[in-house]
Image (cartoon, coloured by chain):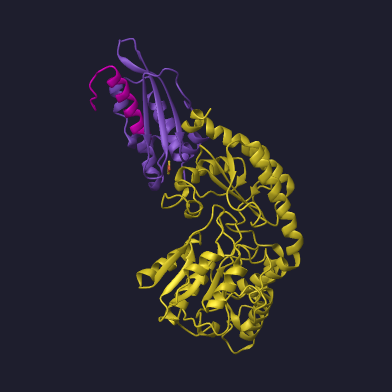
Chain colours: A yellow, B purple
Amino acid sequence: MRSPTLIYLDYAATTPVDPRVVKTMLPYFTKKFGNTASLHSFGLEAKEAVEKGRKIIADAIKASVKEIYFTSSASESNNLALKGLAWANKDKKHIIISSVEHDCVLTSAAWLEQQGWSLTLLPVDKYGLVDPKEVQKAIRPDTLAVSVMHANNEIGTVNPIGEIGKICRDKGVYFHTDAAQTFGKIPIDVNRLNIDLLTASAHKMCGPKGVAMLYVRSGVRIRPLLHGGGHEGGLRSSTLNVPAIVGFAEGVKICLAEMKKESARLGKLRDKLIKGALTKISDSHLNGHPKKRLPNNANFRFSYIEGEALIMMLDNLGIAASTASACSSPKLQPSHVLLACGLRPQDAHGSLRLSLGRWTTESEIDKVLEVLPAVVEKLRKISPFSSINN
Amino acid sequence: MYSPKTIKYFNSPKNYGKIKNPDGIGKVGNIICGDVMWLYIKIGKDKKKQEVIKDIKYETFGCVAAIATSGQVTELAKGKTIAEALAISKDAIVEELGGLPPIKLHCSVLAVDALAEAIYDYLSKNKRQFRKI
Ligand code: FES
């Protein structure tokens, strides 16, 4: 067990699994371990559990059970959405995505571009928002699909996906949204929002890792990435991860029941954190939209310092957070999200994401507000740039 | 991913800050990730009347590895003659720190370059030749 004094503020990366979720999963490892494809009672028991879960998840977004496909991760769902649509609709060779999508959408789209599809990257404003008018402008007669994330994983900006969905529907273009950061936090109705495909993942909402889903509206033409025994209506062959699906569904149930109260609670803590940090620390800025943002996301940038160093210092003090600085990325490149928002590379350097969740308390936020200014100050003392400005 | 020694150097950084009226300044930047290091030296004479690095300080805008190697290079160079200081290699620094992750090796280059630049600055101000020894 980790020390209770450790403060975890990286819920956007992953969450602990809720003990209630773990409890529902456990029997499916040892006793109810059947393969859903088997005809005997073990198989039936497993299949029933999966279908029960599918119903809970379908209801959560006002979809029907036939439209929910279980996958292993949000990355897989996003790959399936883009490549699956492309392969099934080769007469339409144009795809539109926003420039702040998760890497798995960006690189899937870039891969399709290499295969002969043409790609449009939508710009965003300084808050990371996609303008629906830009979507309207980008759609061509040969446009197959538009993919715009519901909320950005880094800066937390929530896009107007309802308006974008409406435009796509009117133009007869498929609309996919990556809802990995919003499912379970913000209400989603795929009909009202005109969504044709939607990605959601369990481990971002206190469910287990290794399970996610793709909603595909019935009638949408799509091909599988994985071929095999024909599971999931032939769209995703692979033995179903029964315990994880059971846990996913339980996680959704809890999120739905607690959503209203929880997002109000987190929103208040987030605002306290943002206001506190911006007033206590000079030359600090908020990344992302001041209002249209996830209730659990705060993202700052502090001039003159570098994010990886900041994260390590916070970690030493027992606070787990994340950054999108160039030094911390495997490619040593600054965050494409912050650059798309118009920041210069050196400004993107000192970014800090603090993402809150179910077990975040007010006293933890107070502690961060006490520690953070001193840590920033310490690093600024080492930096050549802060002294020029003094 | 970092060695305990690197973390130690990072957590309790030594020799950071500025030197007033330095004899040499080395300002280097890292095109790989965009980091910057400034290094200041003050030159004095030792008992044998040789020129030595009497004082040395750095300012770094960079990652954990950059800050740790900055500290390490200043520790290694302090009190050394110019020839000795120029002989400090990036490998020596990396070894001294107990190794660096491969992706972070470029950060240690920054520190050695800044030291060489600062010495070069001092020598050229005094109209002397820069010789890598
Ligand atoms: S200074 Fe950027 S990776 Fe080390």
Which residue is drawn at the image coordinates 56% and 32% (left, top)? A378
Q: Is residue B53 above or below residue B109?
A: above
Q: Quadrant of ligand 1?
A: top left
* B131 falls in the magenta region: yes
Q: Is residue A303 visible?
A: yes
- Image quarter where the C terminus of chain B lies is top left
Which residue is drawn at the image coordinates 71% and 54% (left, top)? A267
Q: Which residues are magenta?
A: B111-133
Q: Is residue A26 visible?
A: no
The answer to whether residue B127 is left or right of residue B34 is left
Q: Estimate the x, y position of residue A282 in percent, counting from the top left.
A: 60, 35
Q: Give the main secondary structure of the magenta stretch.
A: helix
Which residue is drawn at the image coordinates 56% and 65% (left, top)? A132
Q: Is residue A375 above or below residue A57?
A: above
- Give the image quarter of residue B29: top left
Q: Estimate the x, y position of residue A205 in percent, counting from the top left.
A: 64, 63
The answer to which of A284 and B57 lies nearer the viewer is: A284
